[in-house]
Image (cartoon, rainbow, N blue to C red):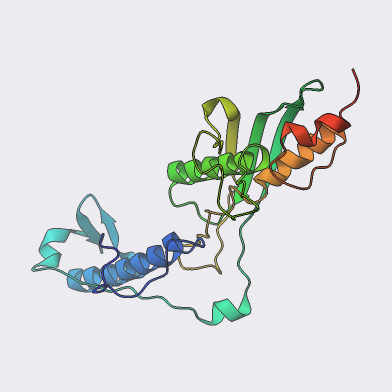
């Protein structure tokens, strides 16, 4: 894999949930071309070709792929926006569920459980996709409850520009979280039927926490983070 070299062809960036689907589709198309070349070299119809255990199998014949390759086969996959971009609208979707407890004396808020259910087309790697969603959900909890940049109103400078005063969620702040993927293949998205997954984990995560706080206390906080000082004066007397 070669990235970040001006000698390489232009490609989509790694942000905006475009990386895997664009580069992955280019690889897919290149592999399709290689498959066609192998079928031609083996003298069989491409639809009847099976590649298995290092062999090309077709028409009741089995040939080592190495013999067909000879000095090597090359193929270039290329993809660019086409008519599908104009005819269809592509979007991932999902839902976040959070169970939150608020201490009625101190206003301290804890997320006890969290579940995210997402549809992102064909999931290319279940383990890394799940980890990405868990990371996004962690970001959402941090945004909702702890992370707050404070500016000096006189100079505009940040006054909490270190990890001692800008609290990023640590292990003790994050509960048991589960991720579920909806079985989906989006045939209109691209040839590999996959869609972006990067934003799904965080989009809505903080809102789910805020809604859970409202459900628990009846207090609607509309400015993140939901720190205890925004709850204390409205909590019921005990």
User: In front: 116, or 61?
Assistant: 116
Label tally: 0
Q: Is residue 89 visible?
A: yes
Where residue 178 appears, as percent x and y from the top left, is: 59, 34
Where residue 122 appears, as percent x and y from the top left, is: 51, 55
Residue drawn at x 56%, y 36% is 167
Which quadrant of the figure has residue 220? top right
Q: Quadrant of the N terminus?
A: bottom left
Residue drawn at x 44%, y 41% is 127
Q: Quadrant of the C terminus?
A: top right
In the displayed structure, 16 sits above or below 74; it is above
User: Viewed as shown, does residue 138 lie left or right of 35?
Assistant: right
User: Viewed as shown, does residue 53 lie left or right of 15?
Assistant: left
In the displayed structure, 166 sits above or below 172; it is below
Where residue 197 appears, as percent x and y from the top left, is: 53, 54
Residue drawn at x 67%, y 37% is 145
């Amino acid at each position: 894999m070669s990235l970040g070299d001006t000698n390489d062809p232009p490609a989509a960036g790694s942000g905006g949930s475009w990386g895997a689907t664009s580069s992955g589709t280019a690889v897919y198309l290149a592999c399709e071309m290689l498959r066609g070349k192998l079928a031609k070299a083996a003298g069989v119809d491409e639809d009847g070709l099976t590649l298995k255990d290092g062999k090309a199998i077709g028409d009741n014949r089995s040939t080592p792929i190495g013999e067909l390759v000879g000095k090597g086969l090359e193929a270039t996959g290329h993809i660019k926006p086409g008519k599908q971009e104009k005819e269809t609208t592509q979007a991932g979707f999902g839902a976040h569920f959070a169970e939150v407890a608020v201490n009625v004396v101190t206003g301290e808020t804890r997320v006890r459980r969290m579940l995210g259910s997402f549809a992102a087309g064909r999931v290319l790697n279940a383990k890394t996709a799940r980890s990405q969603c868990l990371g996004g959900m962690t970001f959402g909890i941090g945004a909702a409850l702890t992370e707050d940049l404070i500016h000096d109103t006189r100079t505009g400078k940040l006054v909490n520009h270190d990890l001692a005063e800008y609290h990023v969620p640590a292990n003790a702040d994050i509960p048991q979280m589960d991720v579920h993927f909806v079985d989906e293949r989006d045939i209109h998205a691209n040839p590999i039927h996959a869609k972006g997954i990067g934003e799904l984990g965080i989009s809505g995560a903080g809102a789910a926490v805020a809604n859970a706080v409202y459900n628990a206390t009846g207090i609607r906080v509309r400015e993140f983070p939901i720190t205890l000082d925004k709850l204390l004066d409205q909590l019921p007397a005990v």
